[in-house]
Amino acid sequence: MKLLITGASGFIGSALIRRLVADGHQIMGLSRSPERLLKTQTAALQVVRTLEEIDAEESIDAIINLAGEPILDKRWSDARKQLIYNSRIDTTTGLIALIKRLKTRPKVLVSGSAIGFYGSCPGDRLLDEGSEGLPGFTHQLCLDWENKALEAQSLGVRVCLLRTGVVLGQGGALQRMLLPFRLALGGPIGDGQQWFSWIHLDDMVAIIQFLLAHEVLTGPFNATAPEPVTNSVFTKALGRALHRPTLLPMPAFVLQWILGEGAELLCEGQRVLPARLLEAGFEFRHPDIDGALNQILS
Ligand SMILES: NC(=O)c1ccc[n+]([C@@H]2O[C@H](COP(=O)([O-])OP(=O)(O)OC[C@H]3O[C@@H](n4cnc5c(N)ncnc54)[C@H](OP(=O)(O)O)[C@@H]3O)[C@@H](O)[C@H]2O)c1
């Protein structure tokens, strides 16, 4: 298969490309910095800087859409939120225009979204793909991002949406959490009772492959492990995996000061279940947090 991947240089995109190339697929990656992408990928790769460069005669079987300004790298200001929003909507709008232009249309678009779709949901309520989202910035962002991707359906393309939890692997969010824990300064956030819906990077890549392969699957899929944990359970598991104590709590107001409104993602949490993936027969390689962290950190 020939696959076009946006966000090809990212944490998920890089791991996905390694897997797909190993399986014999041809990859075209979109990156604003093609030279940087080519340097970091050992695999043979065709890279484009813009979607407009892609010829209408190009034959692309599938598109995976992962591009977007990082969510929690910087404090959320109005300008930052606009950048986070525009980077996703503009790339997806560009993909719809590309699909219209291509002489042979791809069969499937697997497009990013996040569990932020459900908004901040304090408490123990279980969320599956049928749950409604609570209003707020992340809900509106994911809703508009998903709706833009779904426009491909009217062009005859199967669309799957990845409502992704926090992806754990070597790099990404876990990398940023490690330093305080290694210094024995790690601890729960706030009262630690908020839910943390996570997924191992290997399972994230396998889910994308599963959705590509199963032609009957469409619509939203929660890309989260089947065993979400509270922040307190996650903190203890991370401490165990690193052989470090986890005694010092991080007060919620400190995170709010560092991240602004974005702190709500870590302080309020969501308890999400991958109901549709389980129903479709997807088997998680890393369903529990201890096993996942030990595999990543060993
Ligand atoms: N990782 C997670 O825990 C997680 C959780 C939930 C949802 N997601 C979603 O899954 C997608 C992939 O995640 P990831 O962790 O792989 O992300 P990442 O490592 O931050 O990579 C994002 C990619 O998007 C591109 N990008 C960044 N800013 C952009 C902008 N302003 N305009 C256009 N492209 C831009 C970058 O490509 P270039 O710089 O090469 O152009 C980069 O390759 C993201 O959309 C993210 O929101 C991730």
Image: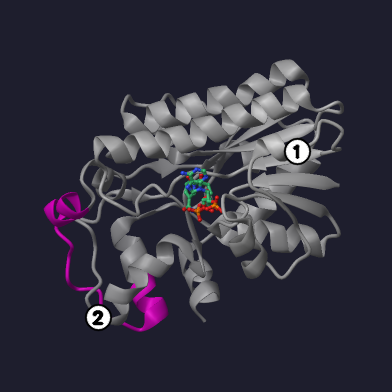
Residue at figure coordinates x 17%, y 65% from the top left: 249
- Quarter location, residue 34: bottom right
Asked where in the image residue 122 lies, by quadrant, the reply is top left
Please report the residue visible at 57 percent of the width from the left and 60 percent of the height from the top: 201
Instruction: Please give the range of residues in magenta.
Output: 237-258
Q: Nearer the viewer, residue 96 or 154?
A: 96
Circles 2 and 1, Cβ within 8 Å, touching? The answer is no
Q: Please determine whether, in this image, residue 226 is positioned above or below residue 144.
A: below
Q: Which residue is mark 2?
A: 184
Number of labels in the image equals 2
Category of crowding for the residue at label 1, using alpha-carbon neighbours closer than 10 angstroms: few (below 14), some (14–19), many (at least 20):
some
Residue at the disc numbered 1: 54
Q: Secondary structure at mark 2?
A: loop
Return the residue nearer the eye: 202 or 62.
62
Q: In this view, which residue lies farthest toward the top? A: 154
Residue 182 visible at all: yes
Kind of residue at disc 1: Ile
Residue 157 in view of the camera: no
* 146 up-or-down from 288: above or below: above
Q: Is residue 145 magenta?
A: no
